[in-house]
Amino acid sequence: MYVYKYRGGIFILSHISPPVHSRQEEIIMHKNLKRTLYLCLLGSISAFGTTTIGMAQDVNGNDSGGVLNISTGTYDYVYGKLQTGSETEISGGNISISGDAVIGFVYGGAASNNTSTVHNNQVTISGSAQVKNVYGGGGYANHKNNHVIIEGNAVILGNNGAGGVYGGISDDMTKITTVSNNTVVIRGNAQIQGGDVYGGNGSGESNTVTIEDNTSVDGTIYGGQSIYGNTNKNIVNINNGTVHDVFGGLSLQQGTYGNSVNLRGNSKILGDVCAGYGANNTTIEMN
């Protein structure tokens, strides 16, 4: 696989190996609800620091219209809207994490089946909050129009080098579900010290990641990434900040089309840049 490496203000066509690592991490969504999350680990992913997030308690905003404001304390799982029955739409979750709060997993909205739609949820992490993993929308469902904002001096730690930040993620490993029009914005002095950043993780399109200001991302950035599905028309915008590998769209077993990476300002690129790469593509997308 050939990509453009950004070195000394110019792009140089270079060869890198395609993603070959895929591992399965079982996590507990809520109480006895288990799900399987497949993570594609591309290249070398760094996780710094030894901060330990204590396993405290779970909280959801189902009884407060999906709105949660947390500025202190330690929590294991935090959900804006959590599917607890046969709901077909999980929407309206709006979580604000700030101050010195320490959180394990944050979901704007979460569903446990692939017949529901998780949409229009938002998570904002600010202040000096520390969080392991952040999901605008997550679960076995269709995900669209979910949003994650990380700003201030917030730190995302990842989960032992995996996880990270997801605008939307589908845990269904088939092509059934769709992940589209989700966004991630990282700005201010925020740091992504562990895990990767995904606009959308799953078969879908039109997801966006925007990196601004003095932020730093130690993992890989994907506008859209999928194992079995197509990833089309995803966008990554880098406007200042320090990042490593960047993919507009990546599909491990299907194709990509119309993805883009936009570099502006004084962005520092420490890895490889590829607009789109698909397993069955005849060409590599560059822009």
Image (cartoon, rainbow, N blue to C red):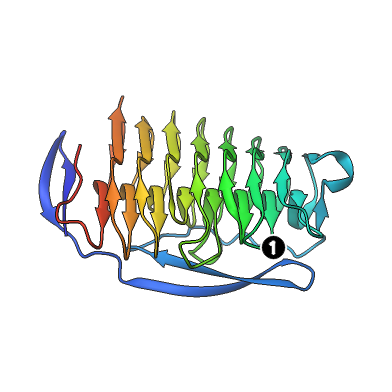
**Which sits in the foreground, 166 or 217?**
166
**Res 104 → quadrant:** bottom right
Which residue shows up at 41% across the image and 59% down it? 46
x 15%, y 37%: residue: 8
> Whole-percent x and y of residue 207?
45, 41
Q: Is residue 243 above or below residue 152?
A: below
* Residue 36 position by quadrant: bottom right
* 252 horizontally vs 141: left or right: left
Residue at 69% x, 63% y is 112
Note whether 165 is above or below 15 in the view shown. Answer: above
Per the image, the residue denoted by label 1 is 112
Answer above or below: position of 206 versus 174.
above
- Residue 118: where, in percent of width, then height? 65, 48
The residue lying toward the viewer, choosing from 166 and 72, is 166
Give the left or right position of residue 257, taking residue 234 as reference.
left
Q: Can residue 197 be seen in this view?
A: yes
Q: Specify the quadrant of the image occupied by residue 51.
A: bottom right
